[in-house]
Image (cartoon, rainbow, N blue to C red):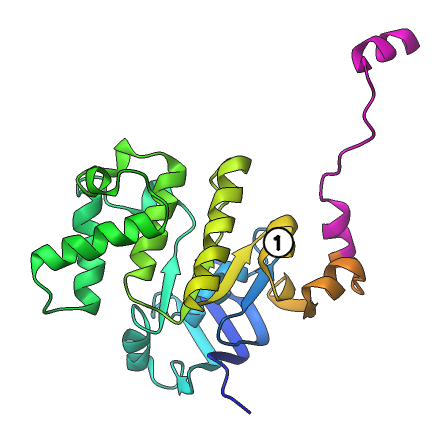
Amino acid sequence: MTTPLLEVTDLQIELVTPAGIVRAVDGVSFTVDRGETVTLIGESGSGKSTTAMGVLRLLPDGLAVLSGSVRFDGVDVIADPAAARRVRGRLASLVPQDPMTALSPVHTIGKQLGEALRLRHRRLPTREIRRRGIALLDQVRISEPERRWRAYPNQLSGGMLQRVLIAIALAAEPDLLVADEPTSALDVTVQAGILDLLLELQERTGVAILMITHDLGVARLVSDRIHVMRAGRFVESGEVEQVTANPRDEYTKALLAAVPRLGPWVENADLAEAGTA
């Protein structure tokens, strides 16, 4: 059997708070294979983003205690924290959830994307960094990429900033993208464009995706497998069709029931309502 790209086993994360120790993640296990999308879904506070940050070892050492194992291509970053620095920005990259605050407002898009490229290719000349950066902006469907290279974040829309964050993540040429609520701050039409972009990039490059979301519609669209999370634990896991069509857990059923649905179309609805008043 091939080794999973990411293998998480019995991951526990305890957070040190003024009120005491809180177990935010309580023994979760899952895998992500090359080229597939695995989604952690749950309401706010369920532990899904904490899981993602723990997997990447991005939680503060003094405030978070991790146990279990997290293996990237067989390398355990829990047993060897120094290995996490070799994994991040090479084997795995993060797409943060808020494009409005994730970028520096005082540096151009080109400078920030160029720094990400230089971390991966330290000896590239400035001209080649610029050429590759503009190509990445074009790859994530940013119009006029040469002009956007010189722009500041405040000059771009939220959807374009999210595309810039994806370009920065791709600059590392990763095998795994960890996408933490990549559409939560965007309106519905822009969300669809970002999800379509991620699926297109996955099809073209073969990158695996660990998606974090509270939106079951997003999970249903992009996932191969889903883990439903509540209070730090997985309450249900399975193939996307099985979980969304035949959920076993009551919490999963409640999540599905909360998805808005369009009712039947009623012509002249205002008049009909007035007639029944």
Q: Residue at x 87, y 12 (%)?
A: 272
Q: Nearer the viewer, residue 135 or 42?
A: 135
In terms of image quadrants, where is residue 1?
bottom right
Relative image position of residue 211 (x, y in whole percent):
52, 60
Residue at figure coordinates x 48%, y 63% from the top left: 203
Q: Viewer-proximal residue, 227 or 264?
A: 264
The answer to whether residue 109 is left or right of residue 141 is: left
Left of 128 or right of it: where is 16?
right
Give me the residue at 31% from left, 67% from top. Answer: 173
Would residue 58 be seen by someone viewing this image from the given angle?
A: no
Q: Point out the stretch of residues depicted in magenta.
A: 253-277
Tell me where residue 82 appears, x and y as whole percent: 28, 80
Tag 1's secondary structure? helix
Q: In x, y percent, where is residue 28? A: 58, 74
- Residue neighbourhood size for the residue with mark 1, other residues' Cα within 10 Å, grouped as few (<14), some (14–19), many (≥20): few
Q: Position of residue 49 (x, y in %)?
A: 49, 59
Seen in the image, is 10 located left or right of residue 169? right
Q: Is residue 116 in view?
A: yes
Q: Residue at x 92, y 11 (%)?
A: 276
Identify the residue under disc 1: 221
Q: Is residue 10 above or below residue 277?
A: below
The quadrant of the rendering that contains the C terminus is: top right
Q: Nearer the viewer, residue 229 or 19?
A: 229
In the displayed structure image, the side of residue 173 where residue 72 appears, left or right: right
The amino acid type found where label 1 is placed reads Leu
Q: Is residue 257 magenta?
A: yes
Residue closest to the eye, 127 or 18: 127
